[in-house]
Image (spheres, rainbow, N blue to C red):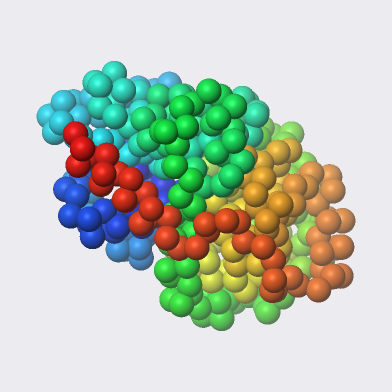
């Protein structure tokens, strides 16, 4: 039983579900309803060919405790009614944590896809979700070598851990030929020279002072190059109140569909982001990525990719330096096993696990 609920879950789950179909494993998909806007959820089901969820718990938004508790209550009933042999959770969102806690207490084994990532910053809600999920999981699927090492450092038994590569990159590689950078650029009326930005981390958008600093930084970028910002609903009000937009050089648009967004990245001179997944996607596409965070749980995107951490105060200068240099296009070392076959590796382990029980 797969649990998904927030935008980044969908491209991670799609290749695992598809590969398990090939293994003939009976599957159910539960949508928690953490994300519910068409642009944050349904569009991914359509574009990625995900099956219709067997159940939508429709929990909606709320504080961490309220949202997680709502999910837990509804998942408990659903797990008791359906009796899954294994619960598969993805990434580090509240849906991941809720399902892990409930399944574990019902003695249902849990598989965690994208285990072992650590920012070492417990002010991030995702870090708490990762720590708890990994501690409780029975199967842990790591996307990078350092995640493997970290799980070992935390005393997690090696036989539970599998280094499989990155299923989000499976989805990227499988859809690469469907992506049309020029089409989305024309649709949005962008010039050929632009950067794309995504901003939704609480540390950037929740507090008025942070948002004001971010607005200033983005205005410094907009003086140099056109900015398109597909804006996550979380930051919309605060970033507008902070004066980030309206601004003549910043094109704020709704969250984009998966294919449209990849098109935007592919055609961009650079990407400015605080997203986790986008650091990975830019790494594989070879597009320079400036990450507006103090740390990353995905250091492999720096050592083997195009990612760099930047401060808000330093952003405009970093963009200036980047625009003065050649766009990096070829011959960078993609992280090991980010080869489009992670879903298949995960499915093999899961099929054997459920088959043996
Ligand atoms: C969540 C994840 C975060 C992930 C992000 C991906 C947690 C703790 N955080 O953050 O790790 O990077 O998803 O996008 O799980 N909202 C809408 N429509 C929607 C969904 C949300 O308007 O469809 C608004 C609501 O005002 C809501 C706010 O966005 O309160 C935040 O949503 P929530 O799911 O709580 O957290 P995210 O910031 O989306
Ligand atoms: N994404 C998208 N449209 C957008 C912004 C992001 O399809 O407008 C995709 C992106 O390509 C990646 C995923 O959403 O596959 C990342 O989700 P997000 O940044 O919301 O979450 P995070 O990875 O930070 O948890």
Identified at 84% across, 48% down, the residue is 314
Horizontal arrangement in the rendering, residue 158 relative to residue 57 (left or right): right
> In terms of image quadrants, where is residue 95?
top left
Visible residue check, residue 230: no
Identified at 28% across, 26% down, the residue is 103
Rendered location of residue 338, percent (x, y): 52, 58
Mark count:
0
Rendered location of residue 346, percent (x, y): 37, 49
> In terms of image quadrants, where is residue 34?
top left
> In terms of image quadrants, where is residue 298?
top right
Q: Would you place residue 303 above or below residue 46 in this image?
A: above
Identified at 81% across, 73% down, the residue is 326
Locate the N terminus and report the quarter of the image it occupies. Answer: top left
Locate the C terminus and report the quarter of the image it occupies. Answer: top left
Viewer-side residue, 137 vs 205: 137
Rendered location of residue 332, percent (x, y): 69, 66
Horizontal arrangement in the rendering, residue 1 relative to residue 189 (left or right): left
Question: Of all residues shown, which one is farthest toward the left?
Answer: 81
Horizontal arrangement in the rendering, residue 85 relative to residue 348 (left or right): left
Q: Would you place residue 55 above or below residue 171 in this image?
A: above
Q: Would you place residue 228 above or below residue 64 in this image?
A: below
Q: Would you place residue 355 above or below residue 74 in this image?
A: below
Question: Of all residues shown, which one is farthest toward the top?
Answer: 105
Viewer-side residue, 282 vs 155: 155
């Amino acid at each position: 039983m797969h649990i998904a609920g927030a935008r980044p879950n969908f491209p991670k789950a799609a290749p695992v579900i598809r590969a398990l179909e090939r293994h003939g494993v009976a599957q159910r998909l539960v949508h928690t309803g953490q994300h519910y806007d068409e642009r944050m959820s349904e569009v991914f089901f359509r574009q990625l060919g995900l099956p219709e969820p067997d159940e939508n718990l429709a929990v909606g938004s709320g504080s961490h405790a309220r949202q997680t508790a709502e999910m837990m209550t509804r998942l408990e009933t659903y797990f008791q009614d359906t009796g899954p042999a294994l619960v598969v959770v993805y990434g580090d969102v509240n849906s991941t944590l809720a399902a892990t806690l409930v399944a574990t207490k019902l003695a249902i084994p849990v598989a965690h896809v994208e285990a072992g990532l650590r920012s070492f910053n417990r002010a991030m809600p995702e870090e708490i979700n990762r720590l708890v999920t990994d501690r409780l999981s029975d199967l842990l699927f790591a996307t990078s070598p350092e995640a493997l090492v970290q799980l070992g450092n935390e005393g997690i038994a090696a036989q539970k851990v599998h280094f499989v590569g990155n299923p989000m990159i499976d989805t990227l590689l499988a859809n690469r030929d469907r992506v049309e950078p020029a089409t989305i650029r024309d649709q949005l009326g962008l010039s050929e020279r632009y950067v794309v930005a995504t901003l939704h981390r609480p540390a950037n958008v929740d507090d008025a002072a942070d948002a004001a600093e971010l607005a200033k930084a983005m205005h410094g970028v907009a003086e140099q190059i056109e900015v398109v910002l597909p804006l996550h609903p979380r930051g919309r009000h605060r970033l507008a109140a902070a004066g980030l937009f309206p601004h003549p050089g910043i094109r704020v648009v709704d969250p984009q569909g998966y294919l449209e967004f990849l098109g935007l990245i592919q055609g961009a001179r650079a990407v400015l982001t605080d997203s986790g997944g986008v650091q990975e996607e830019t790494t594989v596409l070879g597009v320079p990525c400036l990450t507006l965070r103090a740390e990353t749980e995905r250091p492999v995107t720096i050592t083997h990719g195009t990612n760099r951490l930047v401060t808000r105060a330093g952003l405009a200068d970093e963009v200036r330096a980047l625009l003065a240099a050649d766009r990096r296009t070829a011959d960078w070392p993609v992280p090991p096993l980010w080869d489009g076959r992670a879903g298949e590796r995960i499915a093999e382990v899961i099929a054997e696990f459920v088959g043996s029980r």
